[in-house]
Amino acid sequence: MAATIRDVAQASGVHVSTVSRTFSAPHLVNTETRNRVLAAAEDLGYRPNRAARALTTGRTHNLGLIVADIANPFFSHLIKGAQAHARTRDYHVFVADTDEDPQVEEELIQTLAKQVDGVLLCSPRLSNRVIEKLREDVPFVVVNRRMKGMSNVLMDVGSGAREAIGHLVSLGHRRIALLAGPAGSWTSREITDAAHAVPGIDLTVFGPNSPTEHGGLALAEAVASADVTGVLAYNDLMAIGLVEGLTALGVEVPGRVSVVGIDDIVAGRVSRPKLTTVAMPAEAAGRTAVDLLLQLVGAGETATPALATLATNLIIRDSTGPVRRELRTDP
Amino acid sequence: MAATIRDVAQASGVHVSTVSRTFSAPHLVNTETRNRVLAAAEDLGYRPNRAARALTTGRTHNLGLIVADIANPFFSHLIKGAQAHARTRDYHVFVADTDEDPQVEEELIQTLAKQVDGVLLCSPRLSNRVIEKLREDVPFVVVNRRMKGMSNVLMDVGSGAREAIGHLVSLGHRRIALLAGPAGSWTSREITDAAHAVPGIDLTVFGPNSPTEHGGLALAEAVASADVTGVLAYNDLMAIGLVEGLTALGVEVPGRVSVVGIDDIVAGRVSRPKLTTVAMPAEAAGRTAVDLLLQLVGAGETATPALATLATNLIIRDSTGPVRRELRTDP
DNA sequence: ATGTTTCGTGCAACCGGTTGCAGTATCACG
DNA sequence: CGTGATACTGCAACCGGTTGCACGAAACAT
């Protein structure tokens, strides 16, 4: 059995409370005593039991991070950013995957709630109502969703979508398809709204869809037979799947159809044609979210929710090109 | 404050121990009483505190999963497999990322040790010696590394490498480069050994290398100027990076050089040329590892370590082709 | 010399559950 | 009707720490 605080107390001839203080409030104990305790602890290989500590302090020094799909590279980078940053604050981040299932998402939050000091909820598929309710159990920071009265980390994906469509328009495209994301996604709604607000284009929305390569692939036929020359996809995975499907159907990209993705994942840089995309600052989002959450956790009830918005930017590669003369709509 | 077991006891007019039993040993309590307790619990929104329970039972019902790089798609699939499978056993999996750093890996295990019932250690970069020592703190299952006396989940990557090289040989390649992985990697050693054992080829080993796209990219010049016609890379990420680099140097793939990766990640299916690769059963590995670990956890000290070996298989795509006549070495 | 701080430590209750043991009630059986 | 088995339930100690409070000793002020 691992050494406990009482073993250390006995070995160093002091009371358990002194040992406890040696670790959690060193300034309260005499230097000499402290050294004796530390020596004994070292000797016995003692390591404080975080779970037990959490019981009295109410602080586990753990954070939960919930994502819809851990296999999505966008999330991996967010996770890396969050974990690395949390480590510098002596916190650990536990990651859980909901498989895009709101039901699982809710359960996960419930279970995690007692084991962590706060939760980073990324791209939630749950309804606002449920999230509001869950908030009573544990502090939240919500990433990729605007929620009043809660701390948020957002990416300016609306502006990214505008920029992407602007790019298509500047290449002469007017009839544009938008591949929407999953039903509960704020980001998807944000993109859709931004796209609808662009003047002078003829927009067709497909969706909601599964935000995966397969989701994009499944739309290839529909897109090919729709009368569009440009496509903006909810994310790179879908864009890549779409390009794959279009190519298989003999539809050239960017010859016949131009495609823009969102996220800037590695696969987009190596696929042919290289994918034009809206880069999302995933790592920065992870770091920022941890900051906001720790702020919230530290402040307790009195905390004022904060809002961070991170910029996105368009990366032009080879999957977009000028619209073919014969397909042009306007003079 | 969240409701505790005592609140429920008070509300339902029974002793705390009865409430406790209602949840952890329902058959010991009278049906009528149980219903009363459950009603009160439901009413107060009571949920058992796992951390507190862990204090007495010694079982947290959490598992730790440590990977070298969460952004590597191979690991994402492993993680998904493990999480989904663990959930069916009422366990949660907490994931942590070491950033390929053995130092971080060790710290992570130490911290995790007290908070989980067991750890899945995937593709460890630590030395066997350190792992042996750490094992005293917490039960392990090691994935992608053969360690005597411990439960292991292995992929038959040696046979995969043989198959890959056999494929190259059948296309006429004799001068073959092997891009090794990171220094501490058992998988890398396994591949290297298998490659060395193939008769009749002229093998050049490059490495150790960082197992990322960038690691492959950095090797492009060296490979281009080496006198080889076929390459086997430690993983797909490196292979993709290499192809990118070679293409940039004007070296055609598979025209001048054929390239084989390992893992079968999505990016390999969409890169041009589509990558020939050795598929690894990552999800199955995750599930299997959880099974072995729970077996170990359940059995306590008396557990006999188990060994699972999963098959790999070669997927031939477009990054490999026959060696050019003028580059051939033998008749 | 006395009163007041300051410092260091011990005492004991507490966090939220679990569990071995004992006590009571009920019931079957001889 | 006595005896023992069975089914519940309560009591209290315990898991591994934390922390408010009290107490004694030393240092300082008056």
Image (cartoon, coloured by chain):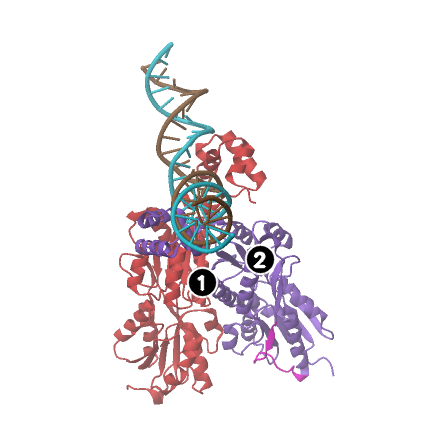
Chain colours: A red, B purple, C cyan, D brown
- Identify the residue at horizontal 61%, vertical 50% (top origin): B133
| Kind of residue indicated by mark 2 | Leu
| Residue B96 covered by magenta stretch | no
Q: Chain of mark 1?
A: A
Please, is residue B153 above or below residue B249 in the view?
above
Q: Magenta span covers which residues?
A: B311-325
Graded by Cα atoms within 10 Å as few (under 14), some (14 to 19) or many (20 or more), the crowding at tag 2 reads many
> Under tag 2, what secondary structure?
helix
The picture places residue A150, in percent across and down from the top left corner, at 30, 56
Please, is residue B20 above or below residue A75 in the view?
above
Instruction: Say which residue label 2 marks.
Output: B296
Instruction: Say which residue label 1 marks.
Output: A77
The picture places residue A48, in percent across and down from the top left corner, at 49, 43
Q: Distance between the Cα atoms at labels 2 and 1?
A: 33 Å
Can you say which quadrant of the picture contains the C terminus of chain B? Answer: bottom right
Residue A319 in view, yes or no: no
Q: Chain of mark 2?
A: B
Same subunit, labels 2 and 1: the answer reads no
The picture places residue B47, in percent across and down from the top left corner, at 37, 54
**Nearer to us: label 2 or label 1:** 2
Report whether B142 appears left or right of A190: right
> Under tag 1, what secondary structure?
helix
Tag shown at residue B232? none
Residue B297 in view, yes or no: yes
Q: Nearer the viewer, residue D12 or B319?
A: D12
